[in-house]
Structure formats: structure tokens, C-alpha cells
Image: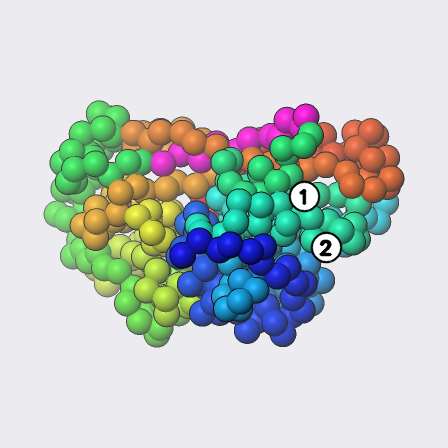
Amino acid sequence: MTLRRMPLIEHADRRAVLALGTEWEDLRRDSSASSAFMTWAWILAWLETEGVGADLEVVTARDPDSGRLVGVAPFYVTRTKRGGMPVRELRLLGSGAAAPDHLDLVVRWDAPPDVADALWAAVTSAQRWHLINFDGVTTAGHLAHAVLRRRGDVPGTLPCPYLPLVGGWDSVASRFESRLRKTLDRDGRKLDRDAEVVERMVVDSADLDETFDDLIRLHQSIHTSKGDHGVFARSGMQRFLRKAAHHFLEAGRLRMWRLEADGKPIAVIWCVRSGDSVAFYTTGYDPKWSKYGPGRRIMARAIKGAIDEGATEFDFLRGDKPYKRLWGTRLRHDLVIRRPTAPRGRVLWLGGAIPRVIRRALRRDAVAGS
């Protein structure tokens, strides 16, 4: 039933936010916030780890008659330095180095049309920060509309490749570049001939911990050999992402596959199911087995698994890297919204610090998606 009166808008403290749980998921399922990174599993993992001491700026909207949750504006304020100056930035819950995509306000479908604007107005009423720093915002979402509609701002964009899963495996694979199809077939035959091969998905907590350790080791070995830090370089990020993986598993969303050869893990891929989409978050493989293409094989297995369970797309998330194009991907874009909201922020903006930040964001392909 469509609400007839404007909801009650309230700021939520940490205790109230942590208590949202079931309400959050009920709201999200009945909204356009379909990203895996807007699920309670991801948000709770962040609150329990990276966001333990975060200065939350969360605003809720509730039906004045029933008390039902109809909207959430999920933000926090972080303190950092820009151009040598201490500044406060407004960011989205769960965002940061983990580089989540497709973020938005969470607003129920039947909420009054101005609820998103009311949530945003409540968030910005205090103006406790100097800069807005949003990364990976859904292009046509409530947040983009609320922030940009009254201004002439031109936000930056992040390319987010995705693969439509139309038809069965043969139909989807026919859209892969021919060299990839040939390589998958050739390397697959070689690996099956030279080793005892097992492909399986993680289904329980004990298996997840072991596989997560393997993922960290394989991912970091590849990235450090290339001179990159890797997404798991920091112990705090390891704790956050491990917690997120467990919460995704409990929620029935985790799609983590492992490839074993002669009883040893040679590749792991971490994907997440949300709605009709399976999103690829990160992967790793053993370079000693590189001649067999374990990274490509585990990616193909994850795509096939998504097809088998009825997903309609495989989301490669941010970063239009050449290897993603081989899989026949299409492009959509998320937004990067950064702008000053206070004199100190404007000084940094005019001084060029913010444009440099934007350029780095636009150049950056998140390590998580590689």
C-alpha cells in the first residue's frame, strides 16, 4: 500500500543502526538497492570491523502510522587529511578501500516520491563535514538524484562491465572472444589430463575459513609479484572481508568456488549473489599452475554456476580491464561524486587537491576486481 503521509525522519545512533538487521533486509528487498554491497551482510561486517569506531550519520524514515521502515540514508563521517589539512568527509557505510559498487540510499518502492530528498536534507542539515566523498554510486539511483539535481555538477564515472546470462552455457560462451574459448578448451583438457581435478563451491563455515586462507595466499602472491598491494595486504581488511564472507554464507549469498589439482587449491574465486545478479568480487590462483589457466577456469566455473542457478547477469564490478572484455562484457557506469560543502573543502577544491583525488579514482581499477 502506498504511504499517504510523509514518513517520520530520525537520526539513528549506533545501537539503533545495529538493531536494524531484519528491517534493513526487508526494506532493501522492496527497494531498488539491489547491490550485494547494500545488503545487511556487508553493512554489518563493516560495522563489526572497519566501522567499529566510525562516526555514523545514519538517517531513517518510518511510516508515521505503522512504524514500518521505508528508507535509510547510510553514511558516516571520516577524518583525514587533504593537502596537509585535516578535513571531515561524508562517506557511505561499507565504502572505502574495499571498493564496493552500485551504492545508494535505500528507499521502499511505495514510499512517497520526496522521501529520498527528505533523507538527504536531514543528513546534510548538520553540515559536520567539509567534503562529500562518494565512490561507486548507482547512476540512476535516489542518492545521485538527491545530490545532483539542484546543481550543475558533472560527476566522474567508473566503468562496471557485466555479462548478460541469456540462454544456457553454450549461448553465453558463444559471446566470449574466440581466443578465450579456444584457450579455455585447450587448457581445460591439459589440466584434466595431467591432474586429478575438483571444482566445488564452499558450503559451510569450516570450509570457508580454509578457503579464505587459500584465497588470501593466492591473491596476494599474484599481486605482490606485480608490485601491487593486493586487497588483503592490511590485516584489518582481511578481518572485514572474512567477516563479510561469513555473513554472505549465512545469508545464502556467498558463491565462493575453489579449483583443486591433485588435492591442492590452485585457484579460488569469490562471488556474491544478490537478486538476479552474481557479482565477481576477487580471485587468486597459483602461478605455478599458470600454464593450465586456473584463473580463467575458475572464472568460467563461476559464470556457469551463475547460469545454472538462474541468474540473469554476471557482474564484473568496477574496472574495464582488458581481461574482462574477453568474456563478452557490456559496460555500465557508477558515479564518483566529490565536492566541497564548507569553506575548508572549497579551499582544497580550488587548490586542486580534489581534482587529483577524482583523477586517481577514475584511473583506479579496484584491486578487488582483478
**Number of residues whose C-alpha sits closer than 10 Å to that of mark 1, classed few (under 14), some (14–19) or many (20 or more):** many
Please tell me whether the stretch drawn in magenta is mainly helix, strand or loop.
strand
Using the image, determine if residue 182 lies above or below residue 296: above
Q: Nearer the viewer, residue 46 or 202?
A: 46
Report x, y in % for residue 62.
56, 62
Identify the residue at horizontal 71%, vertical 62% (top origin): 55
Q: Is residue 226 visible?
A: no
Check if mark 1's residue and mark 2's residue have beta carbons within 8 Å.
Answer: yes
Report x, y in % for residue 225.
49, 44
Report x, y in % for residue 154.
64, 26
Q: Is residue 8 visible?
A: yes
| Mark 2 residue type | Thr
What residue would you read off at disc 1?
Answer: 133
What residue would you read off at disc 2?
Answer: 78
Identify the residue at horizontal 16%, vertical 33% (top origin): 171
Location of the C terminus (image quadrant): top left
Which coloring applies here? rainbow
Say whether residue 160 is magenta: yes
Report the Cα–Cα distance between label 1 and label 2: 10 Å
Helix, strand or loop at disc 1? strand
Q: Which mark is residue 120?
A: none
Location of the N terminus (image quadrant): bottom left
Q: Nearer the viewer, residue 284 or 114?
A: 114
- Magenta stretch in the rendered image: 152-162
76 displayed left or right of 344:
left
Q: State the image quarter where residue 210 is shown.
A: bottom left
Identify the residue at horizontal 69%, vertical 53% (top origin): 122
Identify the residue at horizontal 19%, vertical 58% (top origin): 198
Q: Nearer the viewer, residue 142 or 97?
A: 142
21 displayed left or right of 350:
left
Report x, y in % for residue 106.
51, 53
